[in-house]
Structure formats: structure tokens, C-alpha cells
Image (cartoon, rainbow, N blue to C red):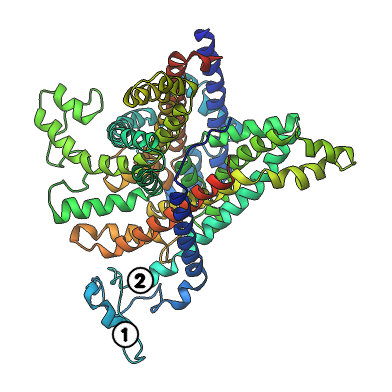
Amino acid sequence: MSVAVHDAPAAGDGLLKIGAIIVGLMTFLAIFGPVIAPYDPTAATDTVSTPPPPLIDWPRLFIAQFDPEIPAPHWFGVDAAGLDVFSRTISAPRTDLLIALTATAFSFVIGVTLGALAGFFRHWSTELLMRASDILQSFPVFISAMILVALAGRSGVNIVLAMTLLYSPIFIRLTRAEVMSLRNRGFVEAARATGVSERNIVFRYVLPNALGPAAAQASVTIGFAILLTAGLSFVGAGVRPPTPEWGLMIANGASQIVLGDWWPSLFPGAAISITVFGFASLGHALERRYGR
Amino acid sequence: MMGRFIIRRLAVGGIQLFVLIIAVFLLIRLLPADPVARFVGLNASPEAYAAAKSNLGLDQSIPKQLGDFLGVTGGDGLLQGSLGRSWVTGDAVAAEVARALPVTLELLTYSFLLACIIGVPLGVLGAVRPGGAADKGTLVFGLFAGSQPEFSWAIMFIFVFFVVLGIAPGPLGRLSPLTDPPTAITGFMTIDGLLAGRPGVTAEAVRYLSLPVLTQAFILSGPIIKMVRQNMAEALQADFVLYARAAGLPERQVALSALHAAFAPSMTLIGVLYGFMLGGAVLIESVFSLGGIGQYAIRSILAFDYPAIQGVVLIISAISLIVYLLIDILHAALDPRAAL
């Protein structure tokens, strides 16, 4: 059953644009962030716990940057360990985004393939697959991810593997439901009548038409994967310091917050807020366009 | 009818829980972690290592360990209601979990109440005038709130309300460290204070809970707005609304009856969210040092405390399943078609 839920088209298009701009910017930083960072994101500068320059001075400082003799200002301040917060914040997408994108890509490919098979063929193995997905989906996500990463070893690869395991079932379920609704359509019968093999029917004809909901979910999942990556390192079960990573930065800043040092945690926190909102907006816009 | 529905759901839930706990048990033993080295240190002699290994029971075969855990080999295990003893504290895991659980339930209950007070009217507002400014505003707010890192907001709230304004207490737990906590009866500090005849303690507990609840409610309001808006919009599309409008009922009354129809599905989704959040309040508990089930999970996982890890996952999953069951029963009572 599909029910039209009205959004003003304007709000939908606006969200699509905002989402696309944020996602584009973060992808740019994931590629070039560490290159354009004015300071080494993992090496101490010669100051500690310095607040950022007042906003009113930013234009003057920015113009002064055209003189190569003048050292780069610490736009976002310096943390208690002497690390430049701006350089770390713009270098972090390479960790956070890369982990989130890889984990989502793995979950998507595995989930969509298994979901197509489970939706098209009725077999004890596909039944078993669905029961296994049920069990996986009833795991408490954050705690399970912590268990997997802490016990398997704190590394980016293990975070990706843990999230792949935990996020695949949603893609299996979405694709299976969509394939089941397409299974008896005319074009499937037509393909079968012309002698196309069952496997080709699933992967060449049905699956491409069934990707909408999973594609919209992928954008949302990337956002959640970023939150999970940052959350894991925030509690000490994620990537290791001094990797430039938003969750680690917030955790380090948290111990300084009662002393009034807001900048080491505000900027990475805002970066996560904006990025995840960007992926969620894009996901919402895609869902309205291509989803159910 | 209803009885059979409940029994079937309980049976399915029980099997699911059993498979889940076995899966967790095997999973933590298959991962390449070495809890023995964690407890004796890396420089321990081989004898000390072997002694610690046998002490923790890890020298036994995995089927034997599983049998001990389940309680089918003679000792106390799951079947006898025991979750084993923590490797870190030596205390019964069941008792430690029972102490931590009410903390999380208290945080979540107040947060959900506040989130519903904010989210339900906003969701309804968005649905009754589709395309209006309120609709766009609530849509964007809902998307934003639902995609926020709660731990970084928690830290910013601490900065603003504790460090700068000084109107909220610091992130030191549920009460001031100087306050003698009341006897735990319900485990809800706000209620135990009243039961102990110490309203001052309740007031203090409310103050200490204010920032965690504010943070959690802000994050939760996102999905709640989205769900209510969706269900309300669907209800407004129903034939009975068309009929009510055709019959000339005032728009306010039409909206009220649509809200009634949207109530059951919204309740279900909010219940699912509550169950989900039991294991999702980890980060807020950690920032505010509340000592709930999530913080207990962090401590156990980082210390490789296997009995405690198993206990936490089991209890969280069991409570989620019970919440889902209660919600399904409530849903079936409100809308008998659901029990079919």
C-alpha cells in the first residue's frame, strides 16, 4: 500500500540541494582535507589550549594568508595536546567518511544480492537467511558494534566489518520486499517466455528495478555509520589516537569543557552534525523520489 | 484469540532470545581477544597465565563453557536464573545489572515523555497543513534532530548550562557526591527520594537529570516527529476523514478523529524506539556518568568481562522483546485487526 504523504516540493528540492552540497564538501575533504590542512593534524604545534581568533578578525587574517611569510592562524584554536583543531577537523572525513562509505557499500552489495535471491526464490536457505537477519536486527546496535570492535581489535577494518554485519539485514529486508512485489509482473513473464535464465531474470531484470528503497536507505545508513564510528571512538572502542577522527576529538575536548575550553569539542561536533544531517537530507529526498 | 496471540508471540520471542544469547556467547569467544592477558598482564609467567585461565574457566572446551553458562552441567547457570559472576568485581552479574537498569529506564522514560510532548504536536501540525510553513519547518527540524550526535550536544549543553550559565549541575552522576542516596526501592532516584520522605533529594535528582533528559529528548524528538507526521498524514487520507468532511464536521473535529486513528501505529513505533534506545543511551550515560546499563556495558566490554557482556546483551534484548510484546498487545487491543 502506498500512501501519498505530501511534502511541499520546494522543501524536498531544498533538502536535496543542501544534502548534495554537504555530501560534496565532505567528499572533497575526505580526498583533499589532509593535503590542504595548514598544520600536521597529528603533530603538536608550539601552543596549547588556545582559543580560536575572534570572528571579527577572520577576514583580516584570511587576507594576510596571501603573504607566505605569515604563519597560518589556528582558525578553530589549539587543543590541550597542542594539536591544531582546524587541521584535524578537516582531515577527519578521510577516516570517518571512508569507514562509513566502505561499510555502507559492503552492506548494500551483500544486502541487495541476498535480498534479491530471498525475494525471488522460495527455498529453505532463503528462509534461514531471513531468520538470521531477524536475529541480527534484534542485536542492540551500538553495544554489539562495541563488542565486535573491542574484542576483534580497534582498527578501521574491524569497524567496517562490524558495521557490515549489523547493517546488511536492513538492505536484505528492503530489497526482498521490493523484489517480491515485482516477482509476478508482466516483464518477468515476458523474459521467462523468451528463454532468459532465472538467474538473469533476477539480476538483470528484477533487481535494477528494485534498488530504489535500498539506495535511499544507503544515504541514511552512511549518516548512521558516521555517528557510530564517532561514538565508538568517543567511548574508547574505535580508532586509536592520535588519528584525526571527530569522535576522538570530542572525547579529548570533553575533559576540558568544565575548564571552559569549548573549541576542541565544538568544531568536530558541528562537523558531525552537519555531515549526518546532509546524508539524512539526501536520503530523505531520494526516498521521496525513488522510494516506496 | 488474544491469549493465543500472546502465547505465540512469547514463544517466538523466547526462541529468538535463546538463539541471540548463544550467538553472543560464541561470538565473543571466537573473536581474537585475550581476556586472560588482560587480567594477569602481559609479563605474567606461563604458570600464572595458566592459573588465571583455569580460574576464568577458559581452559574448558567451548561446549562445556556453554553448558556451564546455561546451567545444564550441574552448577548454577541461566536456567537457574544466574548470569554468573563478573570477572572484574566478582559480584553477581544479575545484581549489578539490576542496579544499573533502573538508571537507564528512568533516563529513557522522562526523555520519551518530554520528546513526545515536543514531537507529537509538531508532527500533527506538519500533517494537518501539508506544504505549509509549519510542515516544512517540522520536516527539517525532525530530520536534523534525528541525525545528531547526542554526545557532542551533551557536552555543549554542559558548557552552556553548567560552565557559562551555572544553572545546571555538572556531569557528576545522579546526585551530588555529597548527598547520601535514598534506599533503592524503585531504582528511580526521583521516586525513591519521595518514598524516603526526602523531597529535597527528588528535587536534586531532577536537577541532575535535567541535562541528560534534555539532550536525549532533543535527539528522540526527530524520529517521533517523523512517525507521528507520517501516521497522521495517512489517517487524514482515510475514507472516514473524507466522509467526516463531506458530512460537514468542523476541521478541528476531523483532525481529532484522525489523531485517534494515528495513535495505535504511532504507539507501536514509539515502543520500538524505546526498546531500541535501551542499548542506545550508552553515550549520554557515559557523558553524564549516570552509571546505567549502557555505561555498565562499556566498562564490561573494554575490560573483556565476558559474563558481564553476556548478561548485558541478554537483559537488553529481553526487555526490548518484552516492550515489543506489550506494544503489540496494546496495539491489538486498540485495533483488533492487528492480532489476526
For marks 1 and 2 on the same chain, the one whose residue lies earlier in the sequence:
1
* Circle on res. A142: none
Callout 1: 10 Å neighbours few (<14), some, many (20+)?
few
Picture coordinates of residue A18 (x, y %)?
Answer: 44, 58
Residue type at numbered disc 2: Phe
Residue beneath label 1, please?
Answer: A63
Q: CA distance from mark 1 to mark 2?
A: 18 Å
In front of the other: A281 or A229: A281
Residue A48 figure quarter: bottom left
Residue B104 figure quarter: top left
Q: Given the image, what chain letter belongs to the residue carrying mark 1?
A: A
Q: Given the image, what chain letter belongs to the residue carrying mark 2?
A: A
Residue beneath label 2, please?
Answer: A86
Residue type at numbered disc 1: Ile
Picture coordinates of residue B78 (x, y %)?
Answer: 48, 24
Residue placed at 36% from the left, 20% from the top? B249
Picture coordinates of residue B86 (x, y %)?
Answer: 40, 36
* Element under disc 1: helix
Picture coordinates of residue A286 (x, y %)?
Answer: 54, 49
Quarter holding the C terminus of chain B is: top right
* Element under disc 2: helix
In front of the other: A158 or B233: B233
